Image: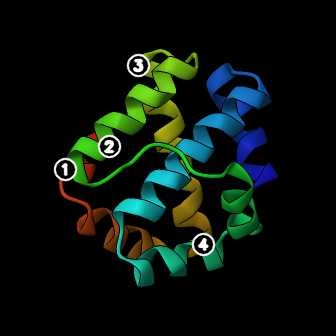
Amino acid sequence: MQELIARIAKNVGIDQDLAMKAVGIIMQFLSEAAPGDKVGALLDALPGAREFLEAQGGGGSFGGMMGAMAAANEMTEAGLDLSQVQDVTKETIKYAREKAGEETVNNIVASIPGLSQFI
């Protein structure tokens, strides 16, 4: 996950600690909102994702479109502006598509109501 965190820090222009927090929020959201088999395929494809998620501990309670808004709110509370929230989310999805493939990521996005409007 360090590759993704460094990439987000560079491309979005935020420090690595904030990038790590944002990625943790996104991963927690996906792990709670997406069906287990779909998110499991993603976690298997992202190097270090399971360990990263475990190290992040529990976050908020996320589910569906309200969960996506709660995740975005958590990221703004962590210090990102709305543009940065969108950029971090897009970078994370782009990275996930590179590592796990279009089909895996599209299946996850399709399984979470309202998520497609955030990415």
Picture quadrant of residue 99: bottom right
C-alpha gap between disc 1 and disc 3: 17 Å
Query: How far apart are the two marked residues, 4 and 3, measured between alpha carbons?
Result: 26 Å
Residue 27, image quadrant: bottom right
Residue for badge 3: 82
Q: Is 2 on the left-hand or right-hand side of 19?
A: right
Q: Say which label, 1 or 3, has the lower sequence index.
A: 3
Q: Secondary structure at mark 3?
A: helix
N-terminal label among 2 and 4: 4
Give SS at disc 2: helix
User: In the image, is 45 to the left or to the right of 96?
Assistant: right
Marks 2 and 4: CB-CB under 8 Å? Answer: no
| Circle number at residue 43 | 4
Percent position of residue 65, x then y: 22, 47
Find out whether the residues at labels 2 and 1 contact each other: C-beta distance under 8 Å.
yes
Q: Residue at image x 47%, y 15%? A: 81
Are the residues flagged by discs 2 and 3 in contact, CB closer than 8 Å?
no
Q: Position of residue 48 (x, y in %)?
A: 77, 66
**What's under tag 4, amino acid-wise?**
Leu
User: Mark 3 or mark 2, which is nearer the start of the sequence?
Assistant: 2
* 7 displayed left or right of 101: right
Residue located beneath label 1 in the image: 114
Q: In whole angstroms, how far apart are the C-alphas of marks 2 and 1?
A: 8 Å
**Which amino acid type corresponds to the residue marked 1 in the rendered image?**
Gly
Identify the residue at the far left of this view: 113
Residue shown at 43%/84% (left/top)? Answer: 37
Query: x, y percentage for residue 8?
Result: 67, 36
Instruction: Check residue 68 in the rendering and tell me which mark sits there, or answer none.
Output: 2
